[in-house]
Image (tube, rainbow, N blue to C red):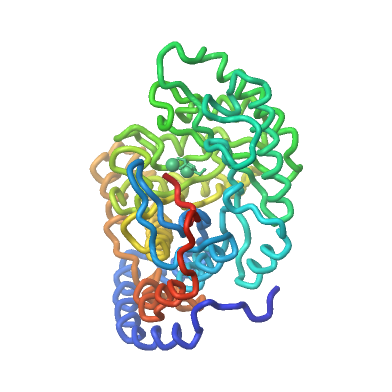
């Protein structure tokens, strides 16, 4: 729609960067193309597919996060949602894989949603699911969430939390968003603190009110998380509870899988398969984790798990094809960066998720099915491994270059000196957090 998209980094610089990379990329691409051709795979089809991939960036991800102990601010952190959009535009300009932003209210609240929408459109960006926040008290709010929000025993607290979620829907409508993600930290720190069943009943009552305010073409994503901040019993701790609630609420309610929200060693790809089978897979928060809600860069700890998740998604997409169900889960990143430049981490993660998507497309599904039918366990496992072991970097780089992005997003970003520029333009303001989820 926009004739010429605004670019944050000078387009000439990106072209110059790509020209420097061109010979090496062409050679790698040709070598990979030859290798894939011997396996009966057309590299051009995969490159075209890679070019369609999209994952949303979380607005809070462009600020420096923190731990329970400290936050070390980064240089040139965005100080408001408009500056966050500028950083998100850089990520999309260089990766061409992140055309939407997931906002978080009230952190990103603006009195001028129209201006925000226009700024985003100018950058070629849209808005994915909006996130509500009832895990913190906000300035001027009448009641505290110290003892819970949607599950609070006090009706006035629940009403306030419901009203906030409905407010998020209104803001999202003005921005062109189509979904609300609800994550609540509600739960108990001590046995006996909550009536376990009563808390979930109150949650459902509150969620019914929010669900009732959803426009016809909106979805509601329920995000589960094993623990933290509640350390004994989190109300929506697992996918089973999430599934039960989404079922209870109705067809517009679906489950959101945050990869870091499970116990270590949980078989997340199986959760994905189950939710897809029963039509309740709403979307993802991609990140990586070693111990808990670590919010590490996608694919940095367990890239094989990410691949196996996409293997299930590819299977589900193939099953949905031709059927009447539309299978289109929302892909979003959800990370917190403490020791890296957030823009570099988000670009790297977007590429890693895209890598898993392409590798999953490389799985020879007919061969896999035949090995499964024949109980040829070794060959079935090797069929997956053959796809996972294939380095598809040249496909990803070629897709980016063809779409106007950078062959090497981090290299191009560093050469452009964007961080130095914003460090000057955005002097740190006392008391202002670049958001960043703790
Ligand atoms: C918290 C939660 C969860 C959620 C995010 C945004 O752990 O990941 O998506 O806040 O509300 O970090
Ligand atoms: Mn999340
Ligand atoms: Mn989380």
Q: Residue at x 52, y 48 (%)?
A: 317
Q: Residue at x 41, y 32 (%)?
A: 228
Q: Residue at x 50, y 24 (%)?
A: 235
Evaluate whether residue 363 shows in this view.
no
Q: Residue at x 42, y 65 (%)?
A: 343
Task: Count up the numbered dots.
Answer: 0
The quadrant of the image that shows the N terminus is bottom right
Comparing 32 with 200, the one in front is 200
Q: Is residue 435 left or right of residue 82?
A: left
Q: Quadrant of residue 338?
A: bottom left
The quadrant of the image that shows the C terminus is top left
Residue 326 image position (x, y, % from top left)? 63, 46
Q: Quadrant of residue 421?
A: bottom left
Comparing 15 with 26, the one in front is 15
> Where is 91 relative to 135, above or below?
below
Which residue sits furthest left? 378
Which residue sits furthest front? 430
Residue 163 image position (x, y, % from top left)? 70, 35
Q: Is residue 14 left or right of residue 20?
A: right
> Where is 372 relative to 190, above or below?
below
Q: Is residue 83 left or right of residue 290?
A: right
Residue 137 image position (x, y, % from top left)? 56, 37
Q: Quadrant of residue 197?
A: top right
Evaluate whether residue 71 shows in this view.
yes
Comparing 267 with 284, the one in front is 284
> Where is 431 relative to 136, above or below?
below
Comparing 174 with 32, the one in front is 174
Residue 110 image position (x, y, % from top left)? 67, 56
């Amino acid at each position: 729609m926009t004739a010429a998209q605004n670019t944050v980094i000078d387009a000439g610089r990106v072209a110059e960067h790509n020209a420097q990379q061109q010979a090496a990329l062409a050679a790698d691409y040709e070598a990979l193309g030859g290798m894939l051709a011997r396996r009966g795979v057309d590299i051009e089809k995969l490159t075209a597919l890679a070019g369609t991939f999209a994952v949303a960036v979380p607005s809070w991800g462009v600020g420096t996060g923190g731990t329970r102990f400290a936050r070390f601010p980064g240089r040139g952190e965005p100080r408001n949602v408009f500056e966050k959009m500028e950083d998100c535009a850089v990520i999309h300009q260089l990766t061409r894989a992140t055309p939407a932003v997931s906002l978080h209210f009230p952190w990103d609240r603006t009195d001028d949603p129209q201006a925000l929408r226009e700024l985003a459109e100018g950058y070629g960006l849209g808005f994915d699911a909006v996130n509500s926040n009832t895990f913190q008290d906000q300035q001027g709010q009448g009641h505290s969430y110290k003892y819970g929000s949607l599950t609070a025993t006090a009706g006035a607290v629940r009403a306030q939390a419901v009203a906030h979620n409905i407010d998020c829907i209104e803001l999202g409508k003005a921005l062109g968003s189509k979904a609300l993600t609800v994550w609540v930290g509600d739960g108990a720190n001590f046995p006996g603190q909550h009536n376990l069943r009563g808390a979930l009943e109150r949650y459902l009552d509150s969620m019914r009110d929010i669900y009732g305010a959803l426009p016809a073409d909106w979805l509601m994503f329920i995000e589960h998380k094993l623990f933290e901040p509640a350390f004994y019993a989190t109300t929506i701790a697992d996918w089973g509870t999430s599934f039960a609630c989404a079922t209870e609420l109705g067809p517009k309610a679906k489950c959101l899988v945050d990869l870091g929200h499970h116990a270590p060693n949980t078989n997340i790809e199986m959760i994905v398969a189950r939710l897809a089978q029963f039509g309740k897979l709403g979307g993802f928060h991609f990140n990586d984790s070693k111990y808990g809600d670590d919010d590490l860069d996608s694919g940095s700890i367990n890239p094989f798990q990410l691949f196996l998740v996409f293997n299930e998604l590819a299977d589900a997409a193939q099953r949905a094809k031709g059927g009447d169900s539309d299978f289109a889960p929302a892909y979003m990143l959800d990370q917190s960066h403490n020791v890296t430049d957030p823009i570099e981490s988000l670009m790297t993660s977007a590429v890693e998720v895209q890598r898993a998507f392409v590798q999953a497309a490389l799985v020879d599904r007919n061969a896999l099915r035949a090995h499964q039918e024949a109980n040829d366990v070794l060959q079935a496992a090797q069929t997956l491994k053959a796809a996972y072991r294939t380095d598809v970097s040249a496909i990803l780089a070629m897709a980016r270059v063809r779409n106007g992005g950078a062959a090497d997003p981090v290299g191009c970003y560093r050469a452009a000196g964007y961080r130095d520029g914003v460090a000057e333009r955005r002097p740190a303001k006392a008391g202002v957090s670049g958001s960043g989820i703790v």
